[in-house]
Amino acid sequence: MTSTDTGTTARYLSKEGNLSQVPKEDKNEQSESQQKKDTEHEKERIEQQKMEEEETKKREATWKTMKYSFIGFGASFGLLGGYMIYQLGSPKVDENGQIIEDEFSSLPPVQQFTSRMWRELNYYQKMIQEPSRKKLLPDPLTHPYIQPPYTLILEMTDVLVHPDWTYQTGWRFKKRPGVDHFLEQVAPPLFEIVVFTADQGMTVFPILDALDPNGYIMYRLVRDATHFVDGHHVKDLSCLNRDLKKVIVVDWNPDSVKFHKSNTILVPRWKGNDDDLMLVDLAAFLRTIALADVDDVRETLEYYGQFDNPVEAFRENQRKLLEQIEERQRLEKDKPAVLTTRGSWSPSFLNKKMQ
Protein backbone atom coordinates (compact mmCIF):
# COMPACT_ATOMS: atom_id res chain seq x y z
CA MET A 1 0.00 0.00 0.00
CA THR A 2 1.37 3.33 -1.00
CA SER A 3 1.59 6.40 1.21
CA THR A 4 -1.17 8.08 -0.78
CA ASP A 5 -3.56 5.26 -0.08
CA THR A 6 -2.67 5.37 3.59
CA GLY A 7 -3.46 9.10 3.86
CA THR A 8 -6.74 8.68 2.05
CA THR A 9 -7.77 5.80 4.22
CA ALA A 10 -6.94 7.64 7.44
CA ARG A 11 -9.45 10.40 6.59
CA TYR A 12 -12.40 8.11 7.21
CA LEU A 13 -13.53 6.04 10.09
CA SER A 14 -14.02 2.38 9.51
CA LYS A 15 -17.48 0.97 10.20
CA GLU A 16 -15.82 -1.74 12.28
CA GLY A 17 -13.90 0.89 14.27
CA ASN A 18 -10.54 -0.15 12.89
CA LEU A 19 -9.75 3.34 11.59
CA SER A 20 -10.25 6.33 13.95
CA GLN A 21 -7.76 8.87 12.82
CA VAL A 22 -9.25 12.39 12.14
CA PRO A 23 -7.42 14.95 10.04
CA LYS A 24 -5.88 17.91 11.88
CA GLU A 25 -7.64 20.41 9.59
CA ASP A 26 -11.11 19.18 10.70
CA LYS A 27 -10.10 19.40 14.33
CA ASN A 28 -9.04 23.03 13.87
CA GLU A 29 -12.36 23.89 12.20
CA GLN A 30 -14.35 22.31 15.01
CA SER A 31 -12.28 24.15 17.60
CA GLU A 32 -12.82 27.53 15.94
CA SER A 33 -16.57 26.88 15.62
CA GLN A 34 -16.81 25.96 19.28
CA GLN A 35 -14.90 29.09 20.28
CA LYS A 36 -17.31 31.25 18.27
CA LYS A 37 -20.30 29.63 19.95
CA ASP A 38 -18.77 30.10 23.37
CA THR A 39 -18.04 33.74 22.57
CA GLU A 40 -21.64 34.35 21.42
CA HIS A 41 -23.04 32.66 24.53
CA GLU A 42 -20.77 34.79 26.70
CA LYS A 43 -21.94 37.97 24.96
CA GLU A 44 -25.58 36.96 25.40
CA ARG A 45 -24.96 36.20 29.07
CA ILE A 46 -23.28 39.57 29.59
CA GLU A 47 -26.10 41.42 27.79
CA GLN A 48 -28.71 39.55 29.80
CA GLN A 49 -26.87 40.40 33.00
CA LYS A 50 -26.72 44.08 32.01
CA MET A 51 -30.45 44.11 31.24
CA GLU A 52 -31.22 42.53 34.59
CA GLU A 53 -29.03 45.06 36.36
CA GLU A 54 -30.73 47.94 34.52
CA GLU A 55 -34.17 46.52 35.35
CA THR A 56 -33.17 46.21 38.99
CA LYS A 57 -31.96 49.82 39.02
CA LYS A 58 -35.22 50.98 37.43
CA ARG A 59 -37.28 49.10 40.03
CA GLU A 60 -35.20 50.56 42.83
CA ALA A 61 -35.57 54.07 41.39
CA THR A 62 -39.33 53.59 40.96
CA TRP A 63 -39.66 52.31 44.51
CA LYS A 64 -37.69 55.27 45.85
CA THR A 65 -39.93 57.66 43.92
CA MET A 66 -43.06 55.94 45.22
CA LYS A 67 -41.68 55.90 48.75
CA TYR A 68 -40.90 59.60 48.68
CA SER A 69 -44.29 60.29 47.09
CA PHE A 70 -46.08 58.35 49.84
CA ILE A 71 -44.07 60.19 52.44
CA GLY A 72 -44.96 63.50 50.79
CA PHE A 73 -48.65 62.60 50.55
CA GLY A 74 -48.65 61.39 54.13
CA ALA A 75 -47.03 64.58 55.33
CA SER A 76 -49.45 66.69 53.27
CA PHE A 77 -52.49 64.84 54.58
CA GLY A 78 -51.09 65.05 58.08
CA LEU A 79 -50.64 68.80 57.81
CA LEU A 80 -54.06 69.18 56.19
CA GLY A 81 -55.67 67.06 58.90
CA GLY A 82 -53.96 69.07 61.60
CA TYR A 83 -55.06 72.31 59.98
CA MET A 84 -58.66 71.06 59.73
CA ILE A 85 -58.65 69.95 63.35
CA TYR A 86 -57.30 73.33 64.39
CA GLN A 87 -59.68 75.38 62.24
CA LEU A 88 -62.84 73.33 62.76
CA GLY A 89 -62.08 72.28 66.32
CA SER A 90 -61.07 75.62 67.78
CA PRO A 91 -63.58 77.07 70.24
CA LYS A 92 -65.52 80.12 69.11
CA VAL A 93 -64.74 83.51 70.60
CA ASP A 94 -66.89 86.55 71.20
CA GLU A 95 -66.27 90.07 69.94
CA ASN A 96 -63.89 90.70 72.83
CA GLY A 97 -61.77 87.66 72.00
CA GLN A 98 -63.03 85.63 74.96
CA ILE A 99 -63.61 81.90 74.44
CA ILE A 100 -67.27 80.90 74.34
CA GLU A 101 -67.89 77.73 76.31
CA ASP A 102 -69.82 74.91 74.65
CA GLU A 103 -70.74 71.30 75.38
CA PHE A 104 -67.16 70.18 74.74
CA SER A 105 -65.38 72.67 77.00
CA SER A 106 -65.13 70.21 79.89
CA LEU A 107 -63.36 67.55 77.79
CA PRO A 108 -59.58 67.12 77.45
CA PRO A 109 -58.05 69.51 74.86
CA VAL A 110 -57.47 66.90 72.15
CA GLN A 111 -60.97 65.49 72.53
CA GLN A 112 -62.41 69.01 72.46
CA PHE A 113 -60.85 69.76 69.10
CA THR A 114 -61.78 66.43 67.49
CA SER A 115 -65.37 66.57 68.80
CA ARG A 116 -65.90 70.08 67.47
CA MET A 117 -64.38 69.06 64.13
CA TRP A 118 -66.79 66.12 63.74
CA ARG A 119 -69.69 68.37 64.65
CA GLU A 120 -68.71 70.85 61.93
CA LEU A 121 -68.16 68.11 59.34
CA ASN A 122 -71.59 66.63 60.09
CA TYR A 123 -73.09 70.08 59.69
CA TYR A 124 -71.53 70.54 56.24
CA GLN A 125 -72.57 67.04 55.20
CA LYS A 126 -76.13 67.75 56.27
CA MET A 127 -76.04 71.06 54.41
CA ILE A 128 -75.05 69.24 51.20
CA GLN A 129 -77.58 66.41 51.54
CA GLU A 130 -80.63 68.39 52.66
CA PRO A 131 -82.42 71.24 50.88
CA SER A 132 -80.86 74.66 51.22
CA ARG A 133 -83.90 76.02 53.06
CA LYS A 134 -86.91 74.67 54.94
CA LYS A 135 -89.45 76.56 52.81
CA LEU A 136 -88.70 76.13 49.13
CA LEU A 137 -91.60 78.36 48.03
CA PRO A 138 -92.87 81.59 49.57
CA ASP A 139 -96.21 81.70 51.33
CA PRO A 140 -99.28 81.51 49.06
CA LEU A 141 -100.51 84.78 47.63
CA THR A 142 -103.24 86.60 49.50
CA HIS A 143 -106.01 88.95 48.38
CA PRO A 144 -106.07 90.95 46.14
CA TYR A 145 -103.64 88.66 44.31
CA ILE A 146 -104.88 85.37 42.90
CA GLN A 147 -103.29 82.19 44.23
CA PRO A 148 -103.95 79.22 41.90
CA PRO A 149 -105.65 76.36 43.77
CA TYR A 150 -103.20 73.71 42.52
CA THR A 151 -99.40 73.55 42.36
CA LEU A 152 -97.86 71.80 39.35
CA ILE A 153 -94.25 70.60 39.76
CA LEU A 154 -92.51 69.92 36.44
CA GLU A 155 -89.21 68.24 35.69
CA MET A 156 -87.35 70.09 32.96
CA THR A 157 -84.93 67.57 31.43
CA ASP A 158 -86.61 64.93 29.23
CA VAL A 159 -90.07 66.27 30.12
CA LEU A 160 -90.01 69.78 28.66
CA VAL A 161 -86.67 69.70 26.83
CA HIS A 162 -84.13 67.06 25.77
CA PRO A 163 -80.32 67.51 25.71
CA ASP A 164 -78.96 66.77 22.24
CA TRP A 165 -75.30 66.66 21.16
CA THR A 166 -73.83 66.80 17.65
CA TYR A 167 -70.36 67.40 16.24
CA GLN A 168 -71.50 70.60 14.57
CA THR A 169 -73.35 72.30 17.45
CA GLY A 170 -72.19 70.51 20.61
CA TRP A 171 -74.74 70.38 23.44
CA ARG A 172 -78.14 71.91 22.70
CA PHE A 173 -81.56 71.52 24.33
CA LYS A 174 -84.42 70.52 22.07
CA LYS A 175 -87.90 71.80 22.91
CA ARG A 176 -90.56 69.13 23.21
CA PRO A 177 -93.44 69.27 20.72
CA GLY A 178 -96.49 70.94 22.25
CA VAL A 179 -94.65 72.57 25.16
CA ASP A 180 -96.01 76.05 24.33
CA HIS A 181 -99.57 74.72 24.19
CA PHE A 182 -99.04 72.81 27.42
CA LEU A 183 -97.80 75.79 29.42
CA GLU A 184 -100.62 77.95 28.10
CA GLN A 185 -103.28 75.37 29.03
CA VAL A 186 -102.09 74.81 32.62
CA ALA A 187 -101.03 78.39 33.34
CA PRO A 188 -102.56 80.43 36.18
CA PRO A 189 -105.25 80.75 37.38
CA LEU A 190 -105.56 76.94 37.16
CA PHE A 191 -102.07 75.93 38.29
CA GLU A 192 -99.10 77.47 40.03
CA ILE A 193 -96.33 76.16 37.75
CA VAL A 194 -92.98 75.31 39.35
CA VAL A 195 -89.99 73.78 37.54
CA PHE A 196 -88.14 71.53 40.00
CA THR A 197 -85.03 69.79 38.67
CA ALA A 198 -81.74 68.34 39.89
CA ASP A 199 -79.78 70.26 37.26
CA GLN A 200 -77.59 73.21 38.16
CA GLY A 201 -79.09 76.68 38.11
CA MET A 202 -76.51 77.99 35.65
CA THR A 203 -77.87 75.46 33.14
CA VAL A 204 -81.57 75.72 33.99
CA PHE A 205 -82.21 79.46 34.10
CA PRO A 206 -81.12 80.38 30.54
CA ILE A 207 -83.13 77.46 29.13
CA LEU A 208 -86.30 78.46 30.98
CA ASP A 209 -85.86 82.09 29.94
CA ALA A 210 -85.96 80.99 26.31
CA LEU A 211 -88.62 78.32 26.84
CA ASP A 212 -91.13 80.49 28.72
CA PRO A 213 -91.11 84.04 27.31
CA ASN A 214 -94.66 84.64 28.63
CA GLY A 215 -93.70 83.94 32.25
CA TYR A 216 -96.14 81.10 32.92
CA ILE A 217 -93.57 79.39 35.17
CA MET A 218 -93.84 81.12 38.53
CA TYR A 219 -90.92 79.52 40.42
CA ARG A 220 -87.72 77.64 39.60
CA LEU A 221 -86.09 75.16 41.97
CA VAL A 222 -82.73 73.56 41.15
CA ARG A 223 -80.25 71.11 42.68
CA ASP A 224 -79.68 72.94 45.95
CA ALA A 225 -83.39 72.47 46.75
CA THR A 226 -83.24 68.66 46.48
CA HIS A 227 -82.59 66.08 49.18
CA PHE A 228 -79.56 63.88 48.40
CA VAL A 229 -80.42 60.32 49.44
CA ASP A 230 -78.69 57.07 48.37
CA GLY A 231 -76.96 58.73 45.46
CA HIS A 232 -80.12 60.39 44.10
CA HIS A 233 -81.37 63.97 44.23
CA VAL A 234 -84.89 63.57 45.62
CA LYS A 235 -87.61 66.22 45.47
CA ASP A 236 -88.99 66.53 48.99
CA LEU A 237 -92.49 67.96 48.58
CA SER A 238 -92.88 68.44 52.31
CA CYS A 239 -90.56 71.46 52.00
CA LEU A 240 -92.67 73.17 49.33
CA ASN A 241 -94.81 75.12 51.81
CA ARG A 242 -97.95 73.94 49.99
CA ASP A 243 -100.90 71.68 50.81
CA LEU A 244 -99.94 68.26 49.41
CA LYS A 245 -103.59 67.57 48.57
CA LYS A 246 -103.22 70.17 45.83
CA VAL A 247 -99.71 69.30 44.56
CA ILE A 248 -99.08 67.36 41.33
CA VAL A 249 -95.59 66.30 40.19
CA VAL A 250 -94.80 65.37 36.59
CA ASP A 251 -91.57 63.39 36.27
CA TRP A 252 -90.10 60.36 34.48
CA ASN A 253 -87.68 59.21 37.22
CA PRO A 254 -89.33 57.37 40.15
CA ASP A 255 -86.19 57.82 42.31
CA SER A 256 -86.61 61.60 42.16
CA VAL A 257 -90.06 61.48 43.78
CA LYS A 258 -89.85 58.38 45.97
CA PHE A 259 -90.95 60.30 49.08
CA HIS A 260 -94.33 61.27 47.56
CA LYS A 261 -95.36 58.72 44.94
CA SER A 262 -99.06 59.45 45.46
CA ASN A 263 -98.52 63.01 44.21
CA THR A 264 -96.72 61.93 41.05
CA ILE A 265 -97.62 61.38 37.42
CA LEU A 266 -94.82 59.24 35.98
CA VAL A 267 -94.62 59.84 32.25
CA PRO A 268 -92.37 58.11 29.70
CA ARG A 269 -88.99 59.73 29.27
CA TRP A 270 -88.85 61.79 26.10
CA LYS A 271 -85.92 60.79 23.87
CA GLY A 272 -86.21 63.70 21.43
CA ASN A 273 -88.58 62.21 18.83
CA ASP A 274 -90.59 64.76 16.85
CA ASP A 275 -93.84 62.76 16.70
CA ASP A 276 -94.43 63.01 20.46
CA LEU A 277 -97.82 64.40 21.61
CA MET A 278 -97.73 63.51 25.28
CA LEU A 279 -97.85 67.11 26.51
CA VAL A 280 -101.10 67.72 24.65
CA ASP A 281 -102.79 64.79 26.40
CA LEU A 282 -101.17 65.70 29.71
CA ALA A 283 -102.57 69.23 29.49
CA ALA A 284 -106.07 67.81 28.97
CA PHE A 285 -105.60 65.49 31.96
CA LEU A 286 -104.47 68.28 34.27
CA ARG A 287 -107.20 70.67 33.14
CA THR A 288 -109.79 67.98 33.83
CA ILE A 289 -108.52 67.64 37.41
CA ALA A 290 -108.49 71.41 37.94
CA LEU A 291 -111.90 72.08 36.38
CA ALA A 292 -113.44 69.20 38.34
CA ASP A 293 -112.26 70.94 41.53
CA VAL A 294 -110.76 67.72 42.93
CA ASP A 295 -110.32 68.07 46.68
CA ASP A 296 -107.40 65.64 47.03
CA VAL A 297 -105.45 64.97 43.84
CA ARG A 298 -103.65 62.02 45.43
CA GLU A 299 -106.69 59.78 45.11
CA THR A 300 -106.91 60.44 41.38
CA LEU A 301 -103.17 60.09 40.84
CA GLU A 302 -103.01 56.85 42.82
CA TYR A 303 -105.66 55.38 40.53
CA TYR A 304 -103.80 56.36 37.36
CA GLY A 305 -100.48 55.39 38.97
CA GLN A 306 -101.34 51.71 38.53
CA PHE A 307 -100.92 52.07 34.75
CA ASP A 308 -97.58 52.07 32.95
CA ASN A 309 -98.61 55.23 31.10
CA PRO A 310 -101.12 57.26 33.16
CA VAL A 311 -101.67 59.81 30.39
CA GLU A 312 -102.49 57.10 27.87
CA ALA A 313 -104.87 55.50 30.39
CA PHE A 314 -106.60 58.87 30.86
CA ARG A 315 -106.93 59.25 27.09
CA GLU A 316 -108.57 55.83 26.88
CA ASN A 317 -110.97 56.68 29.72
CA GLN A 318 -111.76 59.96 28.00
CA ARG A 319 -112.59 58.12 24.80
CA LYS A 320 -114.95 55.79 26.67
CA LEU A 321 -116.56 58.76 28.41
CA LEU A 322 -117.16 60.51 25.09
CA GLU A 323 -118.79 57.37 23.75
CA GLN A 324 -121.07 57.24 26.80
CA ILE A 325 -121.95 60.93 26.39
CA GLU A 326 -122.77 60.43 22.73
CA GLU A 327 -124.90 57.41 23.58
CA ARG A 328 -126.72 59.39 26.27
CA GLN A 329 -127.32 62.28 23.90
CA ARG A 330 -128.70 59.89 21.33
CA LEU A 331 -131.10 58.45 23.91
CA GLU A 332 -132.11 61.95 24.99
CA LYS A 333 -132.95 62.80 21.40
CA ASP A 334 -135.12 59.71 21.10
CA LYS A 335 -136.89 60.31 24.42
CA PRO A 336 -138.60 63.65 23.55
CA ALA A 337 -139.98 62.12 20.34
CA VAL A 338 -141.77 59.47 22.39
CA LEU A 339 -143.18 62.07 24.76
CA THR A 340 -144.49 64.17 21.86
CA THR A 341 -146.38 61.20 20.50
CA ARG A 342 -147.93 60.53 23.86
CA GLY A 343 -148.81 64.20 24.29
CA SER A 344 -150.70 64.29 21.02
CA TRP A 345 -152.42 61.03 21.84
CA SER A 346 -153.40 61.76 25.45
CA PRO A 347 -155.63 64.76 24.82
CA SER A 348 -157.44 62.97 22.05
CA PHE A 349 -157.88 59.96 24.25
CA LEU A 350 -159.24 62.05 27.11
CA ASN A 351 -161.51 64.09 24.82
CA LYS A 352 -162.94 60.96 23.29
CA LYS A 353 -163.68 59.51 26.69
CA MET A 354 -165.44 62.68 27.90
CA GLN A 355 -167.83 62.64 24.96
Image (cartoon, helix red, strand yellow):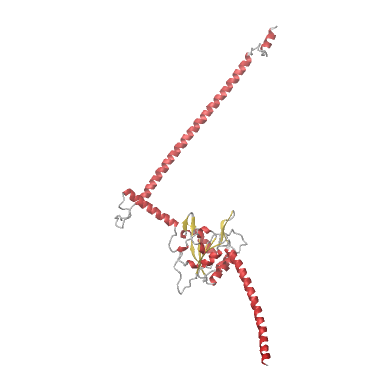
- Could you say which is closer to the camera, residue 59 or residue 118? 118
Q: Residue furthest top?
A: 1
The spot of residue 7 in percent (x, y) is: 67, 10
Q: Can residue 212 be seen in this view?
A: no
| 314 left or right of 65 in image | right
Residue 45's place in the image compared with 106, above or below, is: above
What residue is rendered at 68% in x and 86% in y?
345
Residue 141's place in the image compared with 206, above or below, is: below
Q: Can residue 78 be seen in this view?
A: yes
The spot of residue 260 in percent (x, y) is: 49, 62
Q: Residue furthest bottom?
A: 355
- Could you say which is closer to the camera, residue 141 or residue 58? 141
What residue is rendered at 62% in x and 72% in y?
324
Residue 39's place in the image compared with 274, above or below, is: above
The spot of residue 269 in percent (x, y) is: 57, 59
What residue is rendered at 55% in x and 25% in y?
43
Quadrant where the C terminus is found in the figure: bottom right
What residue is rendered at 46% in x and 63% in y?
238
Quadrant where the N terminus is found in the figure: top right
The spot of residue 234 in percent (x, y) is: 49, 58
Number of numbered markers? 0
- Could you say which is closer to the camera, residue 268 or residue 131? 268
